[in-house]
Image (cartoon, helix red, strand yellow):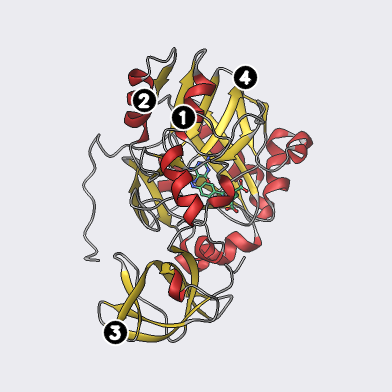
Amino acid sequence: MTGALISPSRRLRRTPFSDGVEAAGVKAYTVYNHMLLPTVFRSVEEDYRHLKEAVQVWDVACERQVEIRGPDAARLVQMLTPRDLRGMLPGQCYYVPIVDETGGMLNDPVAVKIAEDRWWISIADSDLLQWVKGVAYGYRLDVLVDEPDVSPLAVQGPKADDLMAKVFGDRVRDIRFFRFDLFDFLGHELVIARSGYSKQGGFEIYVEGTEIGMPLWNALMEAGKELDVHAGCPNLIERIEGGLLSYGNDMTDENTPHECGLGRFCNTHTAIGCVGRDALLRVAQEGPIRQIRAIEIDGPALPGCDRLWQLRAGEQVVGRVSSATWSPDFSTNVAIGMVRMTHWNAGTELAVELPDGTRRDAIVKEGFWL
Ligand code: THG
């Protein structure tokens, strides 16, 4: 990294919470769905420690919604994913792999079923809207597909329930994992789900429009003073420890859900209508020949992983590492890699090719750390 700044422009969208993020002293951003996403407040390590001990408010407005409305909405969502949606009720959220006609991953969003005929697909970093509009148009479906101005604000950490109860009342405590309910804030009805991109527990508030963005941010910061609330963001260390995948980093459209370890979110036999179904039935039959694995890399803290690092067994390339960082809690480097089946068993010892040399002492783990 050069340390150069990023030039602001209207293509790089701000969020309803950007003023609060800046007041909280954001130190670095990335770009996600053409929108600002904070990556560091105090330091990645301090943010990590605090996330695991207290409560944070995250501007994840960049988790944009693809909204699907109309009589064919449920049919269209089922065309996008090999996860069987027939048992899904309004008020539920599902983590859904989205695949193309070859079974390649296009995104790994959270689907929010508002009503039989109204869904939000809360997307990871790829331009999914265009694929969804194309499928809807190609099949002449009776739906409207667009990107409403709905911005998730996440509240994550062990004290998330206490903070949320102060602002929305004790009823928030009753929301079950990956369910949502409706709550009032200043006369606006909000969807609040128990979900979020950390393993520390918490909520996501889907904020419609910009008007209540800063009032809500400020209310959470004010109510959380005695809980040591702080602005935060998805944390690199915690998400690798937890095995939360990052689309575009850990997987792309070159990978099937099975390669990504997302087979448990696929019901390809019964997901009738999924455009990638035939392709996935074939790969599900054979099983993947490479798959995501937790990798531990001993030795000093690794540099940032901004390109793939080859995994080797002797001279043979057997995979690649896509995310890696030092873990203070496990006193080792934790990483996410894609490993060929010949070398994917737990305990397999490998070497990693970094830009500045080889690290031996990489080992395939049985599972992730959290
Ligand atoms: N929340 C919302 N939208 C999102 C994300 C989110 N869009 C972008 C990105 N994150 C999508 N990717 C993920 C990856 C993992 C999870 C959610 C979205 C996740 N996984 C849990 C796990 O693996 O432990 C639980 C999955 C389950 O059991 O259903 O939460 O975070 N709105």
C-alpha gap between disc 4 and disc 1 = 36 Å
Vertical comparison of 95 with 119: above or below = below
Local crowd at mark 1 within 10 Å, few (<14), some, or many (≥20)? Answer: many
Please give the name of the residue rendered at 33% of the width and 20% of the height, measured from the top-left corner. 138
Quarter of the figure with residue 174: top right
CB atoms of marks 2 and 1 within 8 Å:
yes
C-alpha gap between disc 2 and disc 4 = 37 Å
Determine whether, in the image, residue 18 is placed left or right of residue 119: left
Q: Position of residue 270 (x, y in %)?
A: 58, 35
- For badge 3, the amino acid type reads Glu
Tell me which label, 3 or 4, sits earlier in the chain.
4
* Residue of label 2: 135
Tell me which label, 2 or 4, sits earlier in the chain.
2
Local crowd at mark 2 within 10 Å, few (<14), some, or many (≥20)? Answer: some
Mark 3, mark 4: which one is toward the viewer? Answer: 3
Mark seen at residue 315 = 3
Mark 2, mark 4: which one is toward the viewer? Answer: 2
* Residue of label 4: 187
Using the image as rendered, state which of residue 153 and residue 290 is in the foreground. Answer: 290
CB atoms of marks 3 and 4 within 8 Å:
no
C-alpha gap between disc 1 and disc 3 = 43 Å
Quarter of the picture holding the N terminus: bottom left
Mark seen at residue 79 = 1
Determine whether, in the image, residue 36 is placed left or right of residue 52: left
